[in-house]
Image (cartoon, helix red, strand yellow):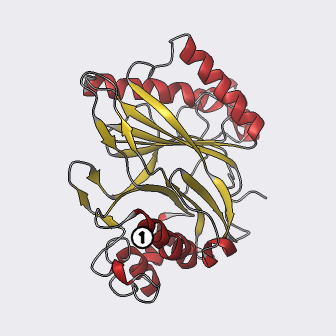
Amino acid sequence: MVGGVLTALARRLGVYGSGPLLPRLFGNPLPPKIPHIRFWIGYADDRLTKPEFLEGLKKVLIPDTTAVGSGKGLIGYMPVVPGKAFYRTGSPPGVLTTPDEFALVVYRDEAVYQAIRKTPEGAAYGAHHFNLDDIADKIGLPLLKGKGFFVKEASGKGTSGSAVVQAYQGKVEIGSAYVTRLKERFDWQGRTVYVRIRIRNTGVSDSDYLSSIQRSLNWTSKQKQLTGHIVRVEKDFTLEYFMADDMGDWVRFLSNETAKILRKRHPLSHITHSDWMIEVKPLPNSAAQSGTFPLDWRSGYQLVFPTEPWDPTHRA
């Protein structure tokens, strides 16, 4: 009887789905099915100058992402260009370079992602991440011949590539990505979105690093001001997207988190440090396609483009 009442209540609240019921009601709301989310990180080819890299992103990678996927199942795209060397704390301090670009790319499901990859334009789009020979002249950047935006293996830095975002279940692994909160029928375009980069301090063991991240995610998953929270865990840093319905909810979340940090009760207070928060601003697809938008270090955008009205993750 009680179980039936709780289940009915969960359905009314929109938190019914897989996993234990009470955590979903009170601590970790995820919809019954999450879309196919790919968390990309990319390390730039060192032969590219800053203007070449940024101009190429504006002329090719950002507009092509929506061109090949819009109307075919792509429902969200949030690229970010952090563009600086972050510094570790500890003794001795050391320079740590984060990815030169990272992004959330969201598809209705994996089937539409695979279908897009198999189209000629989808295959070309994938290849252009690492080789621009066939379009360098056409885009007015002949110096990009023999280069790509990214290298698959960046010596001393990391590996370029995507991790498929998984529903967070209380454990994390290096090289993986997780969603801890996601409002059902979430609109991936035009929300209040910020990203944060946390850098692992020197002298922190793997076990302490991962367990602290897990405790942090456990806490964040309970913060109802957020409509979405997605994280990628790497050996020396974490990347987080925070999503809220409006700026007021975002400010309330930050206030709660700041209070916890000041009381030295935040799980990551002594494990990582972070000086950077980047706003991910809405960008109309028309501006992206024409390349008429500013792009520099510490830029982030949410592409706003048409999606199928019947898309189950699109708000009514």
Circle 1 SS class: helix
Q: Nearer the viewer, residue 274 or 109?
A: 274
Relative placement, left or right, of 174 versus 114 is left
| Residue at the (60%, 57%) spot, across then down | 301
| Residue at the (71%, 40%) spot, across then down | 11
The image shows residue 137, relative to residue 130, as above or below, that is below
Identify residue type, mark 1: Glu
Q: Mark yes or no: residue 235 visible.
A: no
Residue 68 at x, y = what percent? 53, 78
Quadrant of the image occupied by residue 281: bottom right
| Mark count | 1
Relative placement, left or right, of 196 versus 255 is left
| Residue at the (43%, 27%) spot, across then down | 273
Image quarter hosting the N terminus: top right
Quadrant of the image occupied by residue 122: bottom left
Residue 163 at x, y = what percent? 38, 54
Residue 60 at x, y = what percent? 49, 76
Image quarter hosting the C terminus: bottom right
Residue 126 at x, y = what percent? 39, 74
Q: Nearer the viewer, residue 283 or 173?
A: 283
Q: Which residue is mark 1?
A: 52
Q: Mark yes or no: residue 260 visible.
A: yes
Toward the top, the furthest residue is 263
Quadrant of the image occupied by residue 282: bottom right
Q: Nearer the viewer, residue 54 or 212?
A: 54
Q: Circle 1: is it few (<14), some (14-19), or many (20+) Cα within 10 Å?
A: some
Relative placement, left or right, of 235 versus 195 is left
